Amino acid sequence: AKRDGKNGFQYFDSITRKEVEVANTIRRDLRVALENGQFFLCYQPLVDIKTGKVASMEALLRWQHPKKGLISPIHFIPIAEETRQIISIGEWMLRTACRQMKEWLNMGYSGFSVSVNVSVHQLQQPDFAKVVLDILNEIDLEPRFLELEITETVLIEAMDTVARNLYRLKEVGVKIIIDDFGTENSSFKYIQKFMVDGLKIDRSFVSNIKVEVNKAIVDAIIFLGHRMKLGVTAEGVETKEQLDYLVESGCDKVQGYYFSKPLPPDEAIRMVQKECNY
Ligand code: C2E
Ligand code: CA
Ligand code: CA
Ligand code: CA
């Protein structure tokens, strides 16, 4: 490679070095982030197209780093998965989201559930279902108010443990949604085997819905999803055009900046009407 500071290699090198540095900082600081209370959750509504009401609130993890400021989960979740810290962070997430849901119910809000993203590493823990059930018990939250978002890889890896966990949770009424549907080795075989409750179409198809092939993919997912009696959600809806297409295609729920960005709980809840039955 050339040594000239202006050549591509040099440039590439410095970017990678910077990235490695950032990753190392994240790896080091992540160890104390949980105990030092640096995580918090934002919530983004999923809107039911038929009723126009909030059907659920997706909890999304945020890390307030003392020096680097807000760090996106796309930068630290892969590292937390690699170091297995996702297991304790994930448990904290579940407990915090369930507590928030309980608080909303106590405040008189209802008609929606809370959705929590669950990593494959969590589902591979033999005691995962028990952890979830204990949290629900401890908080006194009915399981039907909890929805778990898992990715398709979860269904392919470590099938036995994952299956046992999912069956135990489904049995009591926790709902299971396949996130980012269409991006992995989408197989309706697994969807059927695990009797999931819904599919969430990945943002990449929604963002590029102007491109014909994406329309075809979206239509196919909605058609097959409905034939299998699954609810179909589309994520990453930003424009009226995207929304119109999804409504016309019979999509059940929509989520995205068009409705709301992920917000702190007090702001997120403003999209939900209080039940006026008191
Ligand atoms: P995801 O589950 O697919 O979440 C959707 C992501 O898209 C969120 O990014 C959200 O802020 C963003 N988003 C929502 N609507 C729009 C839109 O209209 N336009 C655009 N451009 N983006 C939109 P976020 O919060 O940065 O999360 C990124 C990913 O990190 C999530 O993707 C999820 O895979 C993961 N993640 C977040 N929180 C958790 C968690 O608590 N546990 C685990 N295991 N993963 C999490
Ligand atoms: Ca998700
Ligand atoms: Ca998603
Ligand atoms: Ca996605």
Image (cartoon, rainbow, N blue to C red):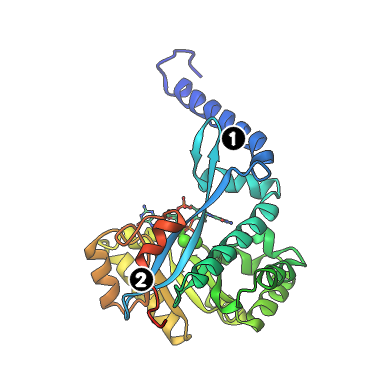
SS class, disc 2: helix
110 left or right, relative to 122:
left
- List x then y, in percent, for residue 98: 59, 66
> Which residue is disc 1 drawn over?
23
Q: Is residue 244 above or below residue 208?
A: below
Label 1 amino acid?
A: Ala
Residue 164: quadrant of the picture: bottom right
Q: Name the residue at 74% across, 63% down.
A: 125
Total numbered labels placed on residues in the image? 2
**Secondary structure under the numbered disc 1 in the rendered image:** helix
The answer to whether residue 70 is seen in the rendering is: yes
Q: Nearer the viewer, residue 261 or 228?
A: 261
Q: Residue at x 36, y 63 (%)?
A: 270
Q: Amino acid at mark 2?
A: Val
Residue 193 horizontal/vertical position (percent): 61, 81
In the displayed structure, 102 sits above or below 40; it is: below
| Quadrant assignment for the C terminus | bottom left
Tell me the residue at 65%/82% (across/down): 172
Q: Which one is nearer the viewer's eye here, 89 or 269?
A: 269
The answer to whether any part of residue 181 appears in the image is: no
Q: Residue at (49%, 68%) from the top-left corner?
A: 104
Residue 43 in the image, given as x and y percentages of width and height: 46, 59
Mark 2 sits on what residue?
A: 218
The vertical placement of 73 against 216, above or below, is above
